[in-house]
């Protein structure tokens, strides 16, 4: 069944690709997301073996700026291991069972870009435990698919290649689900107190994760959009965030965007998504470009999470 659906979607991708050369980029799901029956069919792309052993390996530990960090890997699916960093405030009693799963943006360093190292440290100091993971093709999970991580190469090889992008979305949603399972079963996290925070491309995929996996208590989307200004081929419906964002409700969602973002454009890429988000939602517009106020935003994100994940 999964094979037949994937073949149909690949055929649709070929048709969409032929149209893209003739017409401007458009996506019908921004205007009308898929119905419930179709959505339920998408979920098979994200199914995984919850009994697969994690075989977690701790590779290093250190303490920096009052935060204990732990570098580790664990098995996600039979052919993929997740590389991760855990952050905890030094001297923490260990009683806090609140966790954030943190997803990076589209930079080559993945979870270890300076901004995300800062984010993990700040959230830990604010009383959260943090699991930051590398998404496939980034950071320690770099592959030959995108040898040089630049926006143009990502668009050409990953974001703008519908079947490959669907596979990437599928794997990342599985990785997030396995991360949730790992935190609950291996690290004693409270299953009702795990939040999802994604930035830029990590925010795009967080819309899909949040809609597909109802276990995350709250979802934060920092500088998200429907598609990059340079993307010219529509995503397959199962990989389109417009088909998932509204399904995060009734769990709370926070969206922060920049008015002068030149990657995710306000009128075409952001506002249509914001209209699809359902209550309870908090939408903030900042007078900045893409990721321009990222570090300044994080304290208010921590405060919002404190109010919504108790």
Image (spheres, rainbow, N blue to C red):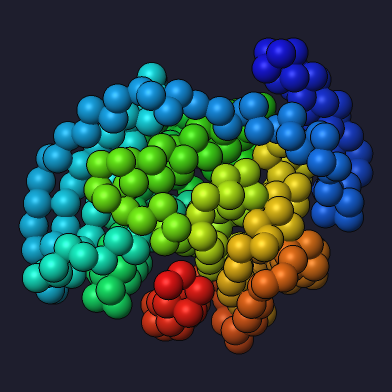
**Is 118 or 50 nearer to us in this picture?**
50
One can see residue 19 in this view: yes
Q: Position of residue 260 (x, y in %)?
A: 65, 78
Q: Is residue 20 above or below residue 214?
A: above
Residue at image x 17%, y 63%? 94
Find the residue positioned furthest to the bottom: 287
Q: Position of residue 202 (x, y in %)?
A: 51, 54
Residue at image x 72%, y 70%? 279
Residue at image x 75%, y 52%? 242
Query: Does residue 292 appear left or right of residue 125 in this picture?
Result: right
One can see residue 200 in this view: no
The image quarter in which residue 271 lies? bottom right
Quadrant (top left, top right, bottom left, bottom right) of the C terminus: bottom left
Query: Does residue 80 appear left or right of residue 88 in this picture?
Result: right
Q: Is residue 54 above or below residue 304?
A: above
Query: Does residue 200 appear left or right of residue 111 in this picture?
Result: right
The image quarter in which residue 277 lies? bottom right
């Amino acid at each position: 069944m999964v094979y037949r659906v994937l073949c149909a979607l690949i055929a649709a991708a070929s048709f969409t690709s032929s149209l893209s050369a003739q017409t401007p980029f458009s996506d019908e799901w921004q205007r009308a997301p898929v119905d419930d029956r179709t959505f339920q069919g998408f979920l098979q792309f994200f199914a995984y073996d919850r009994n697969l052993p994690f075989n977690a390996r701790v590779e290093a530990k250190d303490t920096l700026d009052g935060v204990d960090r732990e570098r580790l890997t664990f098995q996600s699916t039979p052919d993929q291991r997740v590389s991760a960093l855990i952050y905890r405030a030094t001297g923490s009693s260990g009683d806090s069972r609140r966790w954030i799963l943190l997803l990076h943006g589209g930079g080559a360093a993945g979870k270890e870009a300076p901004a995300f190292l800062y984010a993990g440290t700040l959230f830990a100091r604010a009383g959260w435990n943090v699991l930051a993971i590398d998404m496939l093709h980034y950071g320690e999970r770099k592959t030959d698919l995108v040898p040089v991580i630049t926006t143009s190469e990502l668009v050409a090889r990953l974001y703008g290649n519908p079947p490959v992008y669907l596979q990437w979305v599928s794997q990342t949603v599985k990785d997030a689900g396995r991360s949730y399972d790992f935190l609950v079963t291996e690290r004693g996290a409270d299953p009702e107190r795990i939040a999802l925070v994604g930035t830029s491309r990590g925010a795009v995929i967080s819309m899909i994760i949040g809609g597909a996996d109802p276990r995350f208590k709250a979802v934060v989307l920092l500088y998200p959009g429907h598609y990059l200004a340079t993307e010219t081929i529509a995503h397959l419906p199962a990989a389109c965030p417009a088909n998932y964002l509204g399904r995060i409700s009734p769990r709370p969602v926070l969206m922060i965007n920049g008015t002068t973002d030149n990657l995710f454009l306000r009128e075409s890429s952001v506002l249509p998504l914001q209209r699809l988000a359902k209550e309870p939602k908090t939408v903030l517009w900042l007078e900045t470009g893409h990721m321009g106020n990222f570090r300044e935003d994080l304290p208010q994100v921590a405060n919002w999470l404190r109010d919504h994940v108790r």
